[in-house]
Image: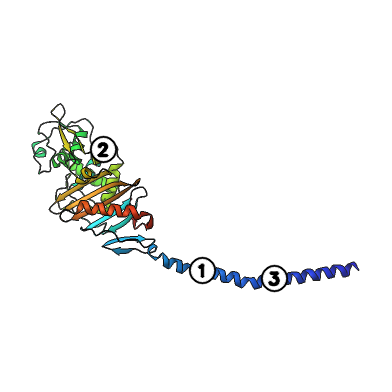
């Protein structure tokens, strides 16, 4: 009797298992169908955010929007790049690696090299050649000594070519060694499209940089507490050791005109056209833009327009590059 009961129970359990299995089998296509539906919807979702997967070009600017956003502003120039400084993500570009004449933006590399090679107290008397450089000038006096801080101020604020040459002339080895150190720093900073032909940025066959490299250079200078003060200081006093001092002002209009500028350097030569690299604080974030070989007087307004476009839509953009 017990045996019959066990057999009966086993039969019932087997039948129940078969029913459950059959039910699960019946449900399986539904599960597979839902998984398939999700998979089928994935391309649709991807289609909706297609710009996230590839770059688009509008008004000559290449960028990667995750959703539809207004086109970037029209920019006049041969090259530009824009970065969110907090992340180092480059978010909008036009020919960012092309090598172009730098103008006085090369002085940012000069300043970075100076704080690494020159003693704070002066050992060098300014020569007539240095004091007589083609202007823009800081107004150095031949035969006088200048502290490093004054040479940096004269270099980056009024963009003195005389200060640039005096810095190179102050090198403990030679002017040529200083220029060699500038190029060594460019290599160490991973700036493949930057080379100094002289410390001032005056037109020279061996002098060039790129928009992306300029952003990296300014970031290094901005993070150096011996260089950074002169990148957004509107005016200061300047003069030789023990001599008369005068007030000098920043020569970059972007610094003078916009209070939310935190670092900037401009340059102008016949080959370079107008060049400007600037960091601007907008809603708590610092946006960097470098614009090269801009014609006419549009460089400041164009850079400003790109800065605010990027600040507004940066959360909807994926990187097209990254600073080293």
* Colouring scheme applied when the structure was drawn: rainbow
The residue beneath circle 1 is 39
Q: Secondary structure at mark 2?
A: helix
**Residue 212 horizontal/vertical position (percent):** 28, 53
> Considering only order in the chain, which callout, 3 or 1, is on the residue closer to the N terminus?
3
Q: Residue furthest top?
A: 242
N-terminal-most mark, 1 or 2: 1
Q: Nearer the viewer, residue 298 or 7?
A: 298
Q: Which residue is mark 3?
A: 21
SS for tag 1? helix
Badges 1 and 2: C-beta atoms under 8 Å apart? no
Q: Is residue 268 above or below residue 172?
A: below
Which residue carries the number 2 mark?
A: 229
Quadrant housing residue 24: bottom right
Please provide percent x and percent y for residue 237: 18, 32
45 left or right of 213 in image = right
**Residue at the (27%, 39%) spot, across then down:** 228
Q: Is residue 214 visible?
A: yes
């Amino acid at each position: 009797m017990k045996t019959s009961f066990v057999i009966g129970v086993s039969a019932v359990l087997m039948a129940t298992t078969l029913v459950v299995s059959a039910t699960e089998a019946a449900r399986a296509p539904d599960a597979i169908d839902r998984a398939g539906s999700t998979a089928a919807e994935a391309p649709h979702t991807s289609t909706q955010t297609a710009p996230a997967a590839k770059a688009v070009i509008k008004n000559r600017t290449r960028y990667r929007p995750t959703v539809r956003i207004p086109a970037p502003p029209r920019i006049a120039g041969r090259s530009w790049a824009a970065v969110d400084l907090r992340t180092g993500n480059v978010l909008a570009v036009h020919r960012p690696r092309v090598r172009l004449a730098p103008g006085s933006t090369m002085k940012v590399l000069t300043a970075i090299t100076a704080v690494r090679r020159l003693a704070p107290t002066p050992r060098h008397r300014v020569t007539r050649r240095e004091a007589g450089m083609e202007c823009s000038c800081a107004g150095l006096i031949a035969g006088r000594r200048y502290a490093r801080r004054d040479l940096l101020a004269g270099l980056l604020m009024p963009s003195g070519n005389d200060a640039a040459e005096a810095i190179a002339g102050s090198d403990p080895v030679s002017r040529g060694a200083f220029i060699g150190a500038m190029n060594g720093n460019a290599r160490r900073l991973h700036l493949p499209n930057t080379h100094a032909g002289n410390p001032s940025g005056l037109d020279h066959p061996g002098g060039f940089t790129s928009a992306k490299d300029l952003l990296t250079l300014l970031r290094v200078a901005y993070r150096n507490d011996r260089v950074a003060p002169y990148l957004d200081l509107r005016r200061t006093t300047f003069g030789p050791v023990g001599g008369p001092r005068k007030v000098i002002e920043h020569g970059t209009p972007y610094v003078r005109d916009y209070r939310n500028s935190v670092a900037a350097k401009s340059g102008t030569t016949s080959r370079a056209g107008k060049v400007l690299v600037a960091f601007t604080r907008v809603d708590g974030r610092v946006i960097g833009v470098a614009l090269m070989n801009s014609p006419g007087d549009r460089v400041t307004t164009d850079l400003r327009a790109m800065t605010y476009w990027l600040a507004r839509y940066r959360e909807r953009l994926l990187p097209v590059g990254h600073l080293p």
